Image (tube, grey):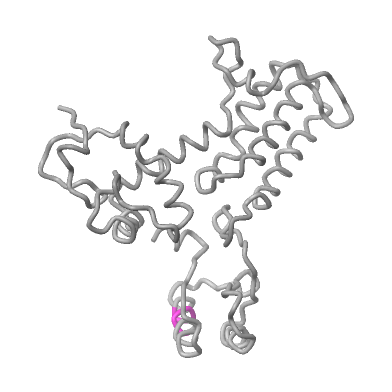
Amino acid sequence: MSYLAFADDIIIFSKGTRKDLQTLMKFLRHYELISRQHINKEKSSFTVDKHTSNLRIRCIQQVTGFRMKFLPITYLGAPLFKGNKKGVLFDDLIQKIQNKITGWVKALLSHGGRLQLIKSVLSAMPTYLLQVLKPPKYVMERIERIFNKFFWGNIGDQRKLIWSSWESICYPTEEGGLGVRRIQDVVQAFQLKLWWRFRIQNSLWSHFLLEKYCKGSHPVSAKLSYIASPNWKRMCRHRKEAENQLFWSIGNEKSHSGSTIGLVRNPFMR
């Protein structure tokens, strides 16, 4: 729930009937009176299914005074979208990275200075978005090409020879690399963490997934339906690898994901 109602932003789901909308607006006006806070209708919007009739859309606009937006929309810095075309969702991020590099054009940076900026600034810029959305492979390669060109001094109109591939640069220092993290390694780490959160944390989100996809089954052996959400499919692709890193302490409690700990499936630690 903390992600549905967060700070100054909130997402409200509704059937969109006139009665439901009138009840909702009455509640929001009551909130304004009690909190002395004003809801900015200019920044408020609604999104509907593509099959929604024009009559229903006009009704929503009339009752709420909100404007309609089409997906994808941005909420808490992450895109909410429908469909499989995810590449365009990273265009803003790539542009921000390029703008950041452009701002360093006049700086007299050594290779060491550029390496430090890649590690501490540029590599950190995609981190937030990568936690919730896996980019297509070509997007990850595009970002890493930008990093590699910057490292070798290809900034603005400057063109210099690229002496090594980005893959070689990302090797650990003891293996002859420079210790930069590859984006796909970061993405995989976040995918494993997502499964860990599902299995360990006692949250509304984990209980929802358990009831929807694992009812009557252990999460490791739950069947993967073709109509499952993309996030659940993404988690299941890494569940065996993640489970091998989970260890349970012996006790009378159930696991936070709601499934009892199995003697065969779950490794124990003393």
**Front-lying residue, 5 or 155:** 155
**In-image side of 222 versus 191 (left or right):** left
Quarter of the image for the N terminus: give it.
bottom left
Whole-percent x and y of residue 98?
A: 75, 38
Please identify the quarter of the rendering in which residue 239 is found.
top left
Q: Which residues are magenta?
A: 26-30
Does residue 21 lie above or below 224 as drawn?
A: below
Does residue 170 lie above or below 18 as drawn?
A: above
Does residue 138 lie above or below 85 as drawn?
A: above
**Front-lying residue, 2 or 254:** 254
**Front-lying residue, 137 or 10:** 137
Q: Main secondary structure of the magenta part?
A: helix
Total count of labels: 0
Residue at figure coordinates x 69%, y 16% from the top left: 112
Residue at figure coordinates x 66%, y 40% from the top left: 138
Quarter of the image for the C terminus: give it.
top left
**Front-lying residue, 216 or 53:** 216
Whole-percent x and y of residue 17?
A: 49, 87
The residue sitting at the left extreme is 252
**In-image side of 96 versus 215 (left or right):** right
Residue at figure coordinates x 24%, y 53% from the top left: 217
Q: Is residue 214 magenta?
A: no
Whole-percent x and y of residue 184?
A: 56, 34
Residue at figure coordinates x 45%, y 76% from the top left: 31
Whole-percent x and y of residue 185?
A: 52, 31
**In-image side of 4 versus 210 (left or right):** right
